[in-house]
Image (cartoon, rainbow, N blue to C red):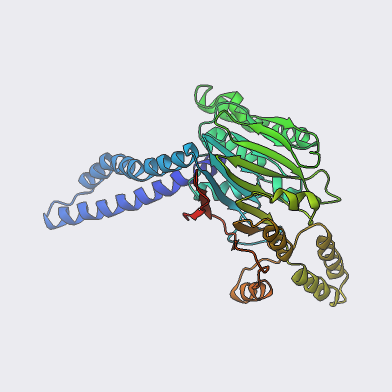
Amino acid sequence: MAQAVGNGCLVRHVTYAMKLGVCVAVVVALVAAFGGALQVGVFDALLLSWGPSIIGFAIERSRIPMQQRFQGFINDDSLHVVLCGTSSPFPDPDRAGPCTLVMGGGELFIVDTGPASVRKMGVLNVDLGRLTGIFLTHYHSDHIGDFGEAVVNSWIQGRREPVPTYGPPGVKNIVEGFGQAYAMDQTYRTAHHEEDNMPQAGSRATAVEFPLPPAGGAEVLTTSRGIKVTAFEMDHYPVHPAVGYRFEFHGRTVLVTGDGEPFAELTKQHEGADLVVRNTISKPLMLQLSAALNSTGRSSFDRLGKMTWDTLDYHSDPLEAMADAAKYQTKLLVICHFAPPMVNLIQRLLAKAVYRKTPAGWSGGIAWGQDGDHWVLPKGTGDIHQIS
């Protein structure tokens, strides 16, 4: 049910309120019992009359402060980066598909909408009603799977106008296709909740298609408060076109690369970047996985071994990402989309043993991104603070 997804944080607060209500009901029952006056009618009357007030009180005390806090991030003069999906296509119970929030200056942008990312944004109390733009890096299913849910849930949470969706050639097909798939949903919700509450315009996205950027990138948006967004080409062949995005605001710069091989344009975009969100796979570990699959002698596993091998030539390895970060002294490199996934202690130890050394002379840091990580880049400083 999309309304539950769109207001996932509200559901959690109602659950909390219901637990609070049960506690109050127990207290009422004990008081009545010790008073010798416990009657079903009295108990029911108290619960029915107090229940809505208790739930409303809990929502007011928990939901509203969270909304206000998140709105403060959006309206801030600093840049904020939140990871709302950090997995590769491998299944991972703790991670949604690729998705990064960039916000500040009155804007809330999403870069890619991987599967389950909208549910994860609900868990993170993201105020999707404030969504002002979606940026797509390329059109692999693991990067666009929740596009329709992002549009419909931001509408449910209060967005009243079509959301601009930026991407290289092909984005019109994505927007139109998801629009057709969700067309009946839109008619149901507007009919049920009425135009005043669910206006038809809010159910839609608008494609903003730009040509494949030339060397150096191409500006695709500058907001009224001065956030500049530049698209640059990525090498993810045969996936073409593919781009990354550079966000600049008050002298701070964030790159969200999407998928791709090391590439001169990508390396150059690191110049002046404070924080880089880089999608990677472990080429040594994926090579070992491919060999293991091929060694079984089973045709079905041979097929998977070949497909695993194929991933090696259109992704970056963390060591390659570190080399780019070191060349231009990026302050923080955030590794996402890591494959094979680190879902248990042995896998985490193995992966970190492979990548324990960083390039000589690099003064920056590396973070292995997890869903919910949130960094702020304050205006007028070179600092980066992690706040969750």
Q: Residue at x 46, y 54 (%)?
A: 387
Q: Looking at the image, is 139 positioned above or below residue 325? A: above
Numbered marks: total: 0
Q: Position of residue 174 (x, y in %)?
A: 75, 37
Residue 173: quarter of image:
top right
Q: Position of residue 231 (x, y in %)?
A: 72, 40
Residue 186: quarter of image:
top right
Q: Position of residue 67 (x, y in %)?
A: 42, 40
Q: Residue at x 70, y 33 (%)?
A: 220
Q: Position of residue 378 (x, y in %)?
A: 49, 46
In front of the other: 124 or 269: 269
* Position of the N terminus by quadrant: top right
Residue 131: quarter of image:
top right
Q: Looking at the image, is 243 positioned above or below residue 354? A: above
Q: Residue furthest front?
A: 361
Question: Visible in this render: residue 215?
Answer: yes
Question: Visible in this render: residue 178?
Answer: no
Q: Is residue 88 left or right of residue 314?
A: left
Q: Is residue 46 left or right of residue 200?
A: left
In front of the other: 100 or 16: 100
